[in-house]
Image (cartoon, rainbow, N blue to C red):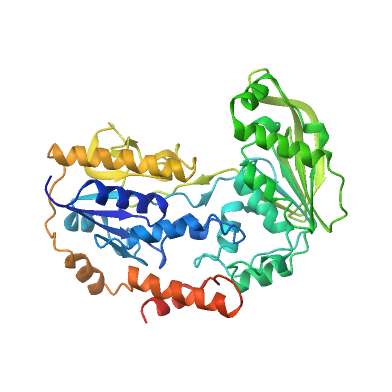
């Protein structure tokens, strides 16, 4: 196959894995990873709680990929503004979109417009030190509700309940530490519509809830229901069995009297946020029961739980991209196995591809991301062999650099990211920690471009 230059828009795991697989499977391929933030790694850097150092091990593997001489990194480059689709078509044979999902799904129940209703993704971005979110977060609630029975909900609950001083061994940014230090929350209520066998927690995340000596984890007995479909899940999947076993241990454990508490309510569906003076004062949930298929329906019995804030961890959403088809209902770029399709007639658009959450929706773990990228790259190489990938007008690797420079874009490089990483590690070393994250974009750029 002839040599090929490919742009990957999005510097998270999905984009980096696509670059890695392409350069492994095609000796003549070179890839430019284009990221709107000054630093790479996407949700691994900006979507993971700071007290998850083992997950940050993924960064080491991603860094090794970016060390490949045939892969370049361009950070602080905003697709649609600094580089438009026509520009990418001029510089590259093909474009792979891997922009992921960063927005929160909206809560569509009465009272959702009350002050105190927050998106979990926004909160995660704040405590992970994302440069584009406010430096402060309104942590004023003593009792908080978290809606959603997945790992993001667990992270949010743990970060709200765990004392800030216990985070000082992590890479937590100073503004985040100061915000959490003033957090008055002592009770965090996590609500799930179904029972223990259908909750989407991972076993390790669930066990971590009890790792803080300052937090008691309480499972409400009334919602601990397992139907026939749930029992089948327990028998079939080891992870489900481990989750149920862990929930059962929490259910049976005696409270230690810790100053903070995480309460897990199962078989309760949020139906309304109650307010006074425009602010959340309680959440109303309807008790549910199984219908024989593993799904649940309401019983008509309601429970009001006093809370002053609600965090909705009910799913991420991808955002549309300029000049690229987008399915608003599904929240993805329409595609066939990674080949981008037109919205109207579903025809393949030659040279455009997609991978990651913006391809399949915000589901799956890192393993799914790798297999997802492999499928997309296989189709790209098949199209290249079939002559469906056109050669660019300006194939010189210097052309895109000249374009960005001429537009005055302060882009960062893989070398610049290395400088920023070294700086963050040195900040951490001085404080007896592995790393302290730099948050302001302008400071990230100054260090990277020094």
Q: Is residue 245 above or below residue 27?
A: above
Quarter of the rendering containing residue 143: bottom right
Identify the residue shown where x is 33% and y is 37%. Answer: 335
Residue 194 lies left or right of residue 49; in this view the side is right
Q: Using the rendered image of the protein, determine whether residue 322 is visible from the camera's viewpoint.
A: yes
In this orientation, does residue 411 appear?
no
Residue 163 place in picture, x, y as percent: 74, 64
Quadrant placement of the N terminus: top left
Q: Position of residue 201 (x, y in %)?
A: 63, 41
Between residues 166 and 443, which one lies in front from this camera angle?
166
* Picture layout, residue 311 above or below residue 268: below
Tell me: 1 left or right of 147.
left
Q: Residue at x 68, y 25 (%)?
A: 296
Of 339 and 252, the residue lying toward us:
252
- Say which of 305 and 256 sits in front: 256
Q: Position of residue 43 (x, y in %)?
A: 49, 55
With respect to residue 378, does 94 lie above or below?
A: below
Q: Which residue is at a point 61% across and 32% down the rendered structure image?
A: 238
Q: In the image, is 28 to the left or to the right of 378?
A: left
- Left or right: residue 233 versus residue 37 is right
Total numbered labels placed on residues in the image? 0
At a point 25% along the width and 73% down the height, the residue shown is 405
Q: Quadrant of the C terminus?
A: bottom left
């Amino acid at each position: 196959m002839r040599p090929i230059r490919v742009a990957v828009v999005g510097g998270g795991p999905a984009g980096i894995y696509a670059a890695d697989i392409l350069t492994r499977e095609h000796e003549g391929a070179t890839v430019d990873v284009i990221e709107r933030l000054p630093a790479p790694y996407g949700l691994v850097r900006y979507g993971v709680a700071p007290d998850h150092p083992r997950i940050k091990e993924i960064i080491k593997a991603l860094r090794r990929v970016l060390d490949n001489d045939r892969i370049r990194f361009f950070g602080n480059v905003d697709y649609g503004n600094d580089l438009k689709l026509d520009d990418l078509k001029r510089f590259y044979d093909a474009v792979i979109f891997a922009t992921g999902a960063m927005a929160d799904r909206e809560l569509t129940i009465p009272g959702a417009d009350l002050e105190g209703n927050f998106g979990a993704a926004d909160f995660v971005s704040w405590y992970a030190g994302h440069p584009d979110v406010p430096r402060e977060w309104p942590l004023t609630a003593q009792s908080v509700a978290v809606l959603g029975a997945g790992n993001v909900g667990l992270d949010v609950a743990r970060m709200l309940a765990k004392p800030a001083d216990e985070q000082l061994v992590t890479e937590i940014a100073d503004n985040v530490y100061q915000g959490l230090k003033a957090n008055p929350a002592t009770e965090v209520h996590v609500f799930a519509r179904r029972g223990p066998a259908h909750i989407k927690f991972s076993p390790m995340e669930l066990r971590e809830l009890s790792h803080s000596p300052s937090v008691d984890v309480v499972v409400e007995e009334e919602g601990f229901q397992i139907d026939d479909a749930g029992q089948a899940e327990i028998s079939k999947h080891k992870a489900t069995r481990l989750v149920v076993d862990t929930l059962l241990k929490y259910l049976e454990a005696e409270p230690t009297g810790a100053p903070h508490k995480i309460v897990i309510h199962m078989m309760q569906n949020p139906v309304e946020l109650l307010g006074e003076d425009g602010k959340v004062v309680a959440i109303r949930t309807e008790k549910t029961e199984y219908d024989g298929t593993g799904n649940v329906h309401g019983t008509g019995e309601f429970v009001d739980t006093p809370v002053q804030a609600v965090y909705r961890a009910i799913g991420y959403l991808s955002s549309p991209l300029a000049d690229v088809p987008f399915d608003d209902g599904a929240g993805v770029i329409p595609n066939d196995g990674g080949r981008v399709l037109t919205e109207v007639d579903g025809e393949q658009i030659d040279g455009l591809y997609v991978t990651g959450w913006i391809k399949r929706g915000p589901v799956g773990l890192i393993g799914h991301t790798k297999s997802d990228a492999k499928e997309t790259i296989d189709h790209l190489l098949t199209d290249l062999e079939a002559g469906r990938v056109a050669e660019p007008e300006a194939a010189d690797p210097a052309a895109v650099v000249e374009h960005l420079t001429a537009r005055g874009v302060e882009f960062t490089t893989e070398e610049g990211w290395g400088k920023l990483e070294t700086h963050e590690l040195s900040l951490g070393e001085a404080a007896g920690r592995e790393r302290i994250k730099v948050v302001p974009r302008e400071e990230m750029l100054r260090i990277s471009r020094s």
